[in-house]
């Protein structure tokens, strides 16, 4: 019987260096896998807000060798705040796809966070200018804090400007980034910083646009990570109108307010979406074609990226 590995958060992070993870994702998106629709289940509670159980399965195609099957289990419990507990808990179960044997239990929060920023960096490898050095980071939470290192794996990032609605949080992240060798500072004038950034990456829970298209200079790459429902926005309609748009998966067209809202109001149409990450990795469509293009990458996450990250983490144990 196969030994089941328990891979905690620290071990998972160590096993998923961004360079290797980005390369693995490029191969994974090119190859593809089976990704059934994710499951959402509501758990009714008597004295707290209802909780949610999310199940995200994926498995390697039948023709692949050494096939894996994985499922991410996520529980979202808003009432945990009153108990001083995290509202979201996640575990990834990796199995042998041919035999069904369980191979590993991996910290799901680490899988999600690192594959999220690595997916954005993979998109930027096709869409940002190769000499991009200045990053404007919008947000300073857990995912946002990982973005500079992921981008540094594919671009010579030197300067990081950080904006967050919570100034204390942005100041704390700036201190950490400076300690890690970046030239980091807190944003005082968001419009000015947006106009001088090579790359703008947003990882927030905003419902109203933070990035405005009139601020953008030619050649900017805009990376939108945070919005994952039709009511959430990080960029206004003009960003989407000015930009050449790429998405991670088809689900982005249904789930991301940054796309659904301008599509619905007619600001953009389907021809504005040039391709998906799979198309870029397979060289079925072009990425950036000039230094003057404004490019936009919108991701909502995928079970494929989870499976790729879990396979890589397991292979390092």
Image (tube, rainbow, N blue to C red):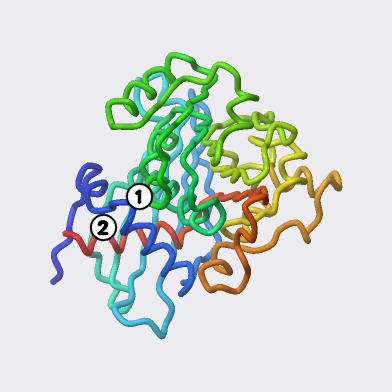
For the view shown, which residue lies furthest in the right direction?
266
The tag on residue 313 is: 2
Q: Which residue is mark 1?
A: 111
Q: Quadrant of the N terminus?
A: bottom left
> What is the spatial separation of the Cα atoms under label 2 and label 1, in whole angstroms?
9 Å
Q: At which x and y percent is residue 93?
A: 31, 58
Helix, strand or loop at label 1? It is helix
The reply to whether the C-beta atoms of the residues labelled 2 and 1 are less than 8 Å apart is yes
User: Residue at the location (43% across, 46% down)?
Assistant: 117
273, above or below 79, in the image = below
Helix, strand or loop at label 2? It is helix
Q: At which x and y percent is residue 75?
A: 42, 41
Of residues 219 and 282, which is closer to you in this image? Answer: 219
Tell me: 68 left or right of 191: left
241, above or below 186, in the image = below
Q: At which x and y percent is residue 173?
A: 38, 24
Of residues 262 and 86, which is closer to you in this image? Answer: 262
Disc on the earlier residue, 2 or 1: 1
């Amino acid at each position: 019987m196969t030994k089941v590995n328990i891979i905690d958060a620290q071990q998972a992070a160590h096993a998923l260096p961004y360079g290797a993870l980005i390369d693995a994702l490029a191969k994974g998106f090119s190859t593809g896998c089976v990704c059934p629709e994710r499951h959402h289940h509501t758990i009714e509670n008597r004295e707290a807000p209802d909780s949610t159980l999310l199940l995200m399965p994926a498995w390697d195609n039948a023709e692949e060798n050494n096939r894996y099957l994985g499922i991410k289990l996520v529980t979202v419990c808003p009432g945990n705040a009153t108990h001083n507990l995290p509202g979201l808990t996640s575990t990834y179960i990796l199995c042998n796809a041919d035999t069904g044997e369980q191979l590993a239990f991996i910290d799901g929060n680490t899988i999600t966070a690192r594959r999220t920023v690595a997916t954005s960096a993979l998109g930027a490898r096709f869409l940002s200018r190769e000499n991009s050095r200045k990053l404007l980071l919008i947000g300073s939470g857990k995912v946002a804090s990982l973005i500079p290192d992921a981008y540094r794996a594919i671009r010579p990032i030197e300067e990081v400007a950080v904006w967050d609605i919570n100034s204390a949080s942005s100041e704390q992240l700036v201190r950490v980034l400076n300690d890690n060798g970046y030239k980091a500072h807190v944003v005082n004038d968001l419009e000015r910083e947006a106009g001088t950034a090579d790359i703008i990456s947003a990882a927030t829970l905003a419902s109203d646009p933070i990035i405005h298209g009139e601020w953008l200079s030619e050649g900017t790459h805009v990376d939108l990570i945070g919005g994952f429902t039709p009511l959430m926005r990080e960029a206004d309609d003009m960003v989407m109108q000015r930009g050449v748009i790429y998405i991670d998966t088809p689900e982005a067209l249904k789930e991301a307010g940054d796309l659904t809202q301008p599509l619905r109001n007619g600001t953009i149409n389907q021809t504005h979406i040039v391709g998906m990450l799979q198309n870029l990795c397979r060289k079925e469509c072009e990425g950036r074609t000039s230094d003057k293009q404004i490019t936009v990458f919108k991701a909502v996450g995928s079970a494929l990226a989870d499976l790729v990250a879990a396979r890589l983490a397991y292979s390092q144990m």
